[in-house]
Image: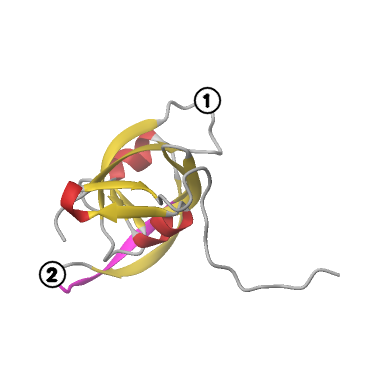
Amino acid sequence: MGIAYAKLRLENPKRPELQPVEVEALADTGSLFLCIPEQIRLQLQLDITSSKEVTTADGKQTLCPYAGPIRVVFENRECYVGGIVIGNEVLLGAVPMEDMDLVVIPPLHRVQVNPRHPNFAGAPCKGFQQS
């Protein structure tokens, strides 16, 4: 598929006085979560709320801190997620990409908003009846 990056703004919604952090995040459709380095967690003063066991690309299982909440902004989209604290770069996983309705364009090595929903995020949802 190739490598694709997305320019993100990360914020701590519990600490709006802190400056946001702008990053080039590696889009990783094989990962579920947003992954952030410890340096980003410290800059945003994110609380560690729990731990998650993750399996890394080399097959090793590791218990990692889970921190948040994190406001993730990409172009005209946003989501609020927690982040796995691991590694030395930000990885944008499938959960925040789905939440913001983003798509990866492999030949262009980039991430963009879903062209079927250019103005707002769309997602499938089980129907309900209004009374």
Q: Is residue 84 left or right of residue 109?
A: right
| Of residues 39 and 104, the one drawn nearer to the viewer in this rendering | 104
Does the magenta stretch mainly form a helix, a strand or a loop? Answer: strand
Residue at screen point 48% across, 50% down: 117
- The image's mark for residue 58 is 2
- The image's mark for residue 34 is none
Task: Identify the secondary structure beneath mark 2.
Answer: loop
| Of residues 14 and 112, the one drawn nearer to the viewer in this rendering | 112
- The image's mark for residue 17 is 1
Task: Identify the secondary structure beneath mark 1.
Answer: loop
Q: What amino acid type should be assigned to the residue bearing mark 2? A: Asp
* Image quadrant containing the C terminus: bottom right
Determine if the magenta segment contains residue 71.
no
* Image quadrant containing the N terminus: bottom left
Residue 48 on image: x %, y %? 44, 52
Q: Earlier in the sequence, mark 1 or mark 2?
A: 1
Q: What amino acid type should be assigned to the residue bearing mark 1? A: Glu
Rendered view: 9 above or below 65: above
